[in-house]
Amino acid sequence: MFHPLVFDNIRVVLEGAVYDRDFEGAITITQRSDVMDMATFHRMFQIEFTLVDRDKNEQAVTAQMQLRTSLADIAAEQLEQPLTEHVGCTICIHFHLPMPYAGDVPQKIKAITTILDDIWGSRPYITQTLKAQVEENRVEWPPQQLRNQITLDFHRKIDEGNIEDLRFLLDHTVQSLTRLQAFADSKPS
């Protein structure tokens, strides 16, 4: 009989919890993917969403929950061999936030970190990656708009023992999305 992987069990619960929030009308799922990378033999599931009725808005902040597992974890679980220290998968949360370019970018980055620390405490490691789109033959500098990819990385593996935590993780993600959207919607001072 087929025995689902830790990854599959967590993916089903996470996906179900996100779809429940969509059905409740709190968020709108905008994209999902479930990938088996044949080059590196790793699995990745990601589901992306915005606050309800924001999915077609250019200024919408999006949240993306990403679950990954590696060949070593899959093999250790299937072979029942201790090939890794702890069999499981990792979860990262990404937020994509539009930011008008202004001289106060460092202050905005600090404000975003403060917002997320208020919600998450100091638990996840937060990185922010700023991107600017430059059109061919139209170099405009400084750019009018930046995209900020904010990544929350927990730097640890999870397994079925953490399934109950997924709803809290989703609650914190939706709360973060709400606060980041309010930040993005606020007028620069």
Image (cartoon, rainbow, N blue to C red):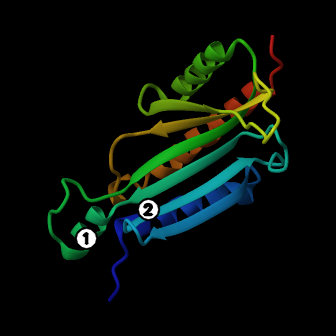
Q: Residue at x 61, y 23 (%)?
A: 112
Residue 147: numbered disc: none
* Circle nearer the N terminus (1, 2): 2
Q: Is residue 61 above or below residue 80?
A: above
Left or right of 99, for residue 153: left
For the C terminus, which image quadrant?
Answer: top right
Where's residue 91, x and y in %? 44, 50
Q: Which residue is mark 1?
A: 75
Farthest residue, direction bottom: 1
Q: Residue at x 73, y 37 (%)?
A: 133
Q: Is residue 134 above or below residue 70?
A: above
- The residue lying toward the viewer, choosing from 78 and 144, is 144
Q: Quadrant of residue 113?
A: top right
Q: Which residue is mark 2?
A: 10
Circle 1 crowding by C-alpha within 10 Å: few under 14, some 14–19, many from 20: some
Where's residue 163, x and y in %? 42, 56
- The residue lying toward the viewer, choosing from 5 and 126, is 126
Where's residue 93, x and y in %? 53, 44
Badge 1 marks a residue whose secondary structure is: helix
Q: Tell whether label 2 touches label 1 (CB within 8 Å).
A: no
Say how many tags the image has: 2
Q: Residue at x 30, y 68 (%)?
A: 74
Q: Is residue 57 above or below residue 187?
A: below
